[in-house]
Amino acid sequence: MEINNFAARRAVASDAAAVAEIWLRSFTAALPSVRRAHTDDQVRSWFREVVVPCQETWVATVDGTAVGMMVLDGQDLDQLYLDPAWQGRGIGGRLVDLAKQRRPDGLTLWTFQVNEPARRFYERHGFVAVECTDGHRNEEREPDVRYVWPSGK
């Protein structure tokens, strides 16, 4: 499905609330069985005070409305979330392509093992699972999997 008026740009302070809401809606929809480590208000504060001002945060918009977000932290694709209403329209793929352009030497990411749709998505985009854990290192204590995307060099 072709999306007109799509844009991806660096997030600014005024985007923090919208980016946090995308994260909250997406996490809730995709991971209903995963215990959240922080309250909604803590998540909103984290995006406002840490993520948007201090990290390479991108916002995806359609007709000026925020519909997705991505955070790059070094070689880590640290966050990639879409508003559930906008999933399946190619926006996630565009954000992954942007991440690959920004980090041509390769990327790593973590996702929860129970998140099968995310795992299929990343595998379709060339990421390879290289490590599974029992979740002892993440705040949710949920088994996770690490993916890498090699640059091809």
Image: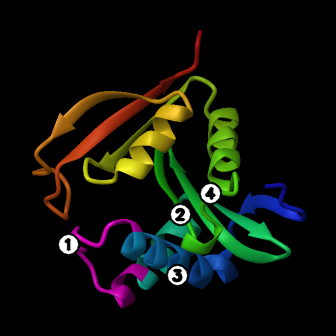
- What type of secondary structure mainly makes up the magenta span? loop
- Residue at image point 22% right, 69% down: 33
- Residue at image point 59% right, 9% down: 153
| Lateral position of residue 139 relative to residue 118, left or right | left
Residue 123 in view, yes or no: yes
Amino acid type, callout 2:
Cys
Q: Where is residue 123 in the image (x, y as percent from the top left)?
A: 47, 33
Near mark 4 (Cα within 10 A), the count class, few <14, some 14-19 or many ≥20, is few
User: Which dot marks residue 21?
Assistant: 3
**Residue 33 magenta-drawn?**
yes
* Among the two numbered marks 4 and 2 on one chain, the one whose residue lies closer to the N terminus: 2
Circle 3: element type: helix
C-alpha gap between disc 2 and disc 1 = 26 Å
Amino acid type, callout 1:
Arg
User: Which dot marks residue 83?
Assistant: none
Amino acid type, callout 3:
Glu
- Write the start and end of the magenta stretch as one range: 30-43
Q: Name the residue under label 1.
A: 35
C-alpha gap between disc 4 and disc 2 = 29 Å
Amino acid type, callout 4:
Gly
Circle 2: element type: helix
Q: Name the residue under label 2.
A: 54
C-alpha gap between disc 3 and disc 4 = 19 Å
Q: Name the residue under label 4.
A: 88
| Lateral position of residue 124 relative to residue 12, left or right | left
Q: Position of residue 32 (x, y in %)?
A: 29, 73
* Among the two numbered marks 3 and 2 on one chain, the one whose residue lies closer to the N terminus: 3
